Image (cartoon, rainbow, N blue to C red):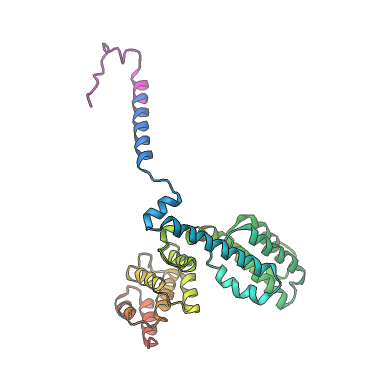
Amino acid sequence: MARIQHNQHNPLFSSFRPNALLKILLCGALLVNSSALSAHTPVADVSTQSAHQGLSQQQLIQIDNQRKSQLERFIRVFEADNRYQQQQISSELMLAGVSDVSLFDIIDHKLYLSLPDATTKTGINYSASLLKVLAYSGNPKYAQRFSKIVNGDYHKKLRKYAKKYQVLLDKYQVWNGILNNTHYYLPNESLHDNQLIAAIQSDELELKRTTARHIFKLKLNALPILNSLERELKHPRLLEHNRLAIDTYAWMAKALAQSRLPQYRPLLSEISATSPEKKLRGYAEDYLEDYY
């Protein structure tokens, strides 16, 4: 680009003071940079996520249909009065990434109706279970319900539960976004498995630990899930010398070990021998002893 000479005889500059001229040049540069950014910055829409991960439009539609079917099933269970079924499905709801008010308004209403009976052990436990499920919504709409119980004239155990799950409500505001982020999803995997994979690959240690516990408890052995655990354990980017980090990686190792698949044994042996964290080395050694 040709350089413009700045002197008093140049008619382009004759009517401008130096400071005003500098502002004009800076504004022009910003406009050029903004245009360049807009031309190269991808729009965060479904088609962009699909192209990035190789998910076809049809696969994204299938995921959306799975979400709708899942939500309808949750609603049917909580509209009914079968507490056992509600308790069973709560484990699935924990990592489903659902925040739809059509479901959680039902749960919130059930919680409200349960409060007068929350004076016995059974009543308190039921109300507490509904509080926990309500926290899975991550929806600030329900924050007032938690506050009313924490500060209200209720049994001290119930107030304690409400305070605990109030914190969980805040966490799920972040976690649900991760669980539903198709950036992490793999083609041809179920919605449930993809959500677990997304959680394992996230940067949220507590979400990773919760997911690893879930995998271990349900003995989930789908290879894409186990492979995601393997990748995180091979490259422990979030491992630090603190309780949460060590416990998170220990649970991921435990979830991987419960598969008893021989291809993962060398990694557990490596962790037991070379991990920089002594406690994690000990955990991995224990898991190896029970491997076969």
Residue shown at the point (64%, 72%) measured from the top left: 86
Which quadrant holds residue 200? bottom left
Front residue of 268/273: it is: 268
The residue lying furthest to the right in this view is 116
Vertical order, 268 against 30 (above or below): below
117 left or right, relative to 229: right
In which quadrant of the rendered image does the C terminus lie? Answer: bottom left
**Residue 82, image x, y percentages:** 69, 75
**Residue 145, image x, y percentages:** 68, 60
Vertical order, 87 against 199 (above or below): below
The residue lying furthest to the left in this view is 2
Residue 16: say if magenta. yes
Residue shown at the point (60%, 75%) measured from the top left: 88
Vertical order, 166 against 121 (above or below): above
93 left or right, relative to 198: right
128 left or right, relative to 278: right
**Residue 19, image x, y percentages:** 36, 22
The residue lying furthest to the front in this view is 58
Residue span colored magenta? 1-23
Front residue of 35/164: it is: 35
Q: What's the magenta bit mostly, secondary-structure-wise?
A: loop
Which quadrant holds residue 155? bottom right
Front residue of 257/77: it is: 77
In which quadrant of the rendered image does the N terminus lie? Answer: top left
